Image: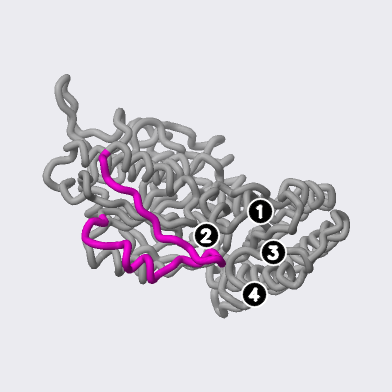
Amino acid sequence: MSVTEGVRPAVHAGALTDDEVAAIRSEFPILAEPGLVYLDSGATSQKPRAVLDAELRYLEHANAAVHRGAHLLGSEATDRFEDARATVAAFIGAAEDEIVWTSSATAALNTVAYAIGNASAGRGGSEADRFRLRQGDEIVVTELEHHANLIPWQELAARTGATLRWIPVDDAGALRMDEAARIIGPATRVLAFSHVSNVLGAVNPVEELVALARAVGAVTVLDACQSVPHLPVDVAALGVDLAAFSGHKMLGPTGIGVLYGRRAVLDALPPFLTGGSMITTVTMEHAEYLPAPQRFEAGTQPVSQAIGLGEAVRYLERVGMPRVAAHEAELGARLAAGLAATDGVRLLGPAPGAPRIGLAAFVVEGVHAHDVGQFLDDRGIEVRVGHHCAQPLHRRLGITASTRASAAVHTTRDEVDALLEGVRNAVAFFGVRS
């Protein structure tokens, strides 16, 4: 029996106890490495044994092409593949046919941008009219976006003649919602924004942004990479049209991403990648496409990865997402308070006491983030350093790079304290003066 089967899933939504976290940690083989303090789950999460075993079982006992073979093995592979889709859909409050498999969240966001571009080129028929971009139309993003939710929109604007605009942030990195209300207007056709900043850990006001977009008929695209693994997320309740997240940030395999789209939106958008498995009829002059989600799943699919992601979702459900969120919020608060109280350290994002997920980025004044990261790495503390694929945000905050610590369901309070002690030692080692 899995240890997590003994963790009560959501009888109460309090943070996990030390004993529960210890039981969870025992299911992650890599965490048995001596001296390892892994605080880089925001980049890539570690995998529990259940996920590793699920992918291996499929490869050993059911490996076959899905939706193609008429033989027993092909049927078994297809059943497992589609069961994973149903599991992921239920996890985020979506229908099964609203979940598209991609290779990553980056691929999911590019799929949307290129599909809108194809609609803008006249593909897709009358149903795609609402997505067509022309000169004078506007695409709105925010100043804190990950590059994966910025560059595709830059490219789409360049291809279509639309104008790219962005909602600025204030000195603390919070979205200027007064500016959002001014910028989102009749010319806005697309609003793309992140649910949680991958640098600041702050949760953005999704409902308020969606309301602004709906008032002008704009399509909403949500980068949910840092929210789905850490918070209970219901995409239908949020009201977004499309959303993207990745498997490798939520205890699942690499090479698998998810594009959620409301059924009416996905069926109206023309496909991006074309080829086998996404068509009904093909002649030498013309092709007819399947409805969503298959119309966006051309070619060989990431089957074992999807199955692994389905198992990762079941793992998180056994713990209970309200408890995951409460545990990581406590760790985030501990990180923020400890960093803010350290002389010579600048905490980025929400001040201590303000809501954040279990993630905090910081700057040791006068010391490059790479040097801070190396100092911590020498002590077994694994963190992320650099601009975290968010150069415009770092530029707005007046820095070139930062150090980021990010927690997961298996992170302990002692690990957070080890990070804080490591930062204090780094301040002393580099002779930082406040």
Query: Does 57 appear above or below 22?
Result: above
Count up the numbered dots: 4
Can I make out residue 95 in this image? no
Residue position for label 3: 346
Residue position for label 1: 402
Using the numbered discs, state the Cα–Cα distance from disc 2 to disc 3 in whole angstroms: 17 Å
- Crowding at dot 3, Cα within 10 Å, few <14 / some 14-19 / many 20+, comes out as some
Q: Which residues are magenta?
A: 160-188
Q: Looking at the picture, how far across and down is residue 43, in whole percent?
A: 60, 49
Mark 2 vs 3, N-terminal side: 2
- Whether residue 259 is in magenta: the answer is no
- Crowding at dot 1, Cα within 10 Å, few <14 / some 14-19 / many 20+, comes out as many
Mark 4 vs 2, N-terminal side: 2
From the viewer's side, name the closer residue of 238 and 20. 238
Residue position for label 4: 352
Mark 2 vs 1, N-terminal side: 2
- Whether residue 180 is in magenta: the answer is yes
- Crowding at dot 2, Cα within 10 Å, few <14 / some 14-19 / many 20+, comes out as many
Mark 1 vs 4, N-terminal side: 4
